[in-house]
């Protein structure tokens, strides 16, 4: 039965993919090879769509792959399969965490974890920044480093940053800045 | 509104306006669940991100489940998780069915190039807000620099960095206590 197989395969993906959504990618390639539910070309499309639509990339890819395999119900089953391990594991951990939060051993561990967690988030932002600002594929053919840098994008980043630090504008919801950036992107064909 | 429905709809809203996955979700979570709903604190959010990166499953889901569980137990965890995936189900199904050449649109590509800029600025801003609570001393700055460099410039899995800094935290605290005891 296709739905049971879908659920179990995506359950496995959710269980073994640790980290961000793109960590699910090797599992999706494996599914493509073993079951032929979708082609590698379709997978490339899925990544593009998942990155340019709202929602977590991992969830979007599972939904897309499920849909490609077995329609709307397939999308639901694959997504539920993907999130099931998180639900079980995190709910168990959350219960334990609640009980031992004040334990000196646990507070000592989190004393080290908090800077690390912040650093990982900063690094994720940094990698988006690097990808956006430098076009490395142009580098070999051009003489000056200045030409590889995406100046309009840096300018937009500065404008958004200043707006977010502004006394009045910082009250605005983050989605306002996202919408503003999308609009600027369209108007100036980024 | 009942807490469970509130959790579902708040996380559906978060899922609908997050572009780019778990890390890009952080600034939106800070606004929605820390500042507006006050379900969790900034520190708790950081702890959940740390745990969410070392446990099975993708970060966005793990964090949503954690916040839901903290707010309203097991059912809260389920409500938040179903909420955060709900917009994806609708949007992706519609695109997969109707818009085969969705990503060919130049309009959409321009819009998304703009959005990507806002994503890293929002993440930078979120990190600046977390900084004061996360990095409390020189040891914290050292851990930040080491983990940031490893994550940004090496292909090492974040799992090892999280486990490593947990161990470092444990050793440092023991050592600091001994220093004080003498």
Image (cartoon, rainbow, N blue to C red):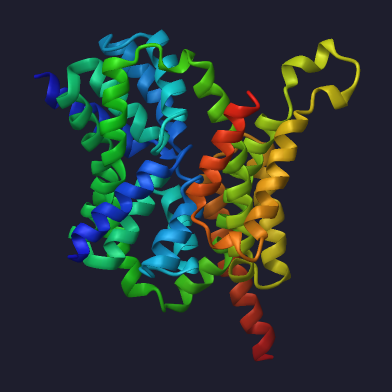
Which residue of the protein is positioned furthest toward the left in this rendering? A1
| Res. B115 in view | no
Q: Is residue A143 shown left or right of residue B3? A: right
**Residue A65: where, in percent of width, then height?**
30, 21
The answer to which image quadrant residue A126 occupies is: top right
Which residue of the protein is positioned furthest toward the front in this rendering? A187
- Image quarter in which the C terminus of chain A is found: top right
Nearer-the-camera pick, B174 or B143: B143
Q: Is residue B32 above or below residue A15?
A: below
Q: Is residue A190 above or below residue A38?
A: below
Q: Residue at x 65, y 76 (%)?
A: B175
Q: Residue at x 61, y 28 (%)?
A: A187
Q: Residue at x 66, y 31 (%)?
A: A132
Q: Residue at x 56, y 34 (%)?
A: A183
Q: Is residue B158 shown left or right of residue B175? A: left
- Image quarter in which the N terminus of chain A is found: top left
| Res. A121 in view | yes
**Residue A15: where, in percent of width, then height?**
31, 39
**Residue A89: where, in percent of width, then height?**
28, 51
**Residue A185: where, in percent of width, then height?**
60, 30
Which residue of the protein is positioned furthest toward the right in this rendering? A143
Q: Is residue B116 above or below residue B52?
A: above
The answer to which image quadrant residue A80 occupies is: top left
Count of numbered circles in the view: 0
């Amino acid at each position: 039965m296709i739905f049971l197989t879908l659920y179990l395969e995506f359950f496995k993906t959710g269980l073994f993919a640790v980290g961000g959504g793109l960590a699910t990618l090797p599992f999706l390639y494996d599914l493509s090879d073993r079951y032929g539910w979708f082609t590698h070309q379709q997978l490339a499309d899925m990544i593009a769509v998942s990155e340019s639509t709202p929602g977590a990339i991992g969830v979007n890819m599972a939904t897309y792959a499920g849909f490609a395999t077995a329609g709307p119900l397939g999308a639901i089953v694959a997504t539920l399969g993907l999130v099931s391990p998180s639900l079980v594991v995190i709910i168990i951990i959350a219960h334990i965490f609640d009980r031992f939060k004040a334990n000196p051993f646990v507070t000592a561990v989190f004393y080290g974890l908090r800077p690390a967690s912040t650093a990982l988030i900063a690094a994720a932002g940094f990698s988006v920044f690097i990808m956006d600002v430098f076009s490395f594929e142009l580098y070999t053919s051009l003489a000056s480093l200045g030409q590889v840098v995406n100046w309009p994008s840096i300018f937009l980043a500065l404008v958004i940053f200043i707006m977010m630090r502004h006394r009045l504008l910082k009250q605005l919801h983050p989605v306002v800045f996202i919408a503003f950036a999308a609009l600027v992107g369209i108007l100036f064909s980024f | 509104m009942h807490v469970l429905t509130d959790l579902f709809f708040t996380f559906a809203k978060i899922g609908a306006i997050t572009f780019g996955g778990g890390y890009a979700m952080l600034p939106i979570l800070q606004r929605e669940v820390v500042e507006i709903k006050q379900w969790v604190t900034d520190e708790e959010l950081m702890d959940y991100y740390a745990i969410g990166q070392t446990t099975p499953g993708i970060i966005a889901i793990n964090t949503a489940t954690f916040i839901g569980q903290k707010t309203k137990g097991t059912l809260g965890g389920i409500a938040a998780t179903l909420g955060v995936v709900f917009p994806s189900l609708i949007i992706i199904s519609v695109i997969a069915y109707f818009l085969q050449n969705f990503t060919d649109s130049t309009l959409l590509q321009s819009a998304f190039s703009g959005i990507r800029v806002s994503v890293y600025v929002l993440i930078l801003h979120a990190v600046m807000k977390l900084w004061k609570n996360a990095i409390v001393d020189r040891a914290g700055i050292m851990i930040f620099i080491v983990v940031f460099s490893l994550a940004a410039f090496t292909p090492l899995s974040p799992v090892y960095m999280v486990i490593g800094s947990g161990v470092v935290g444990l050793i440092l605290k023991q050592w600091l206590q001994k220093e004080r005891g003498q």
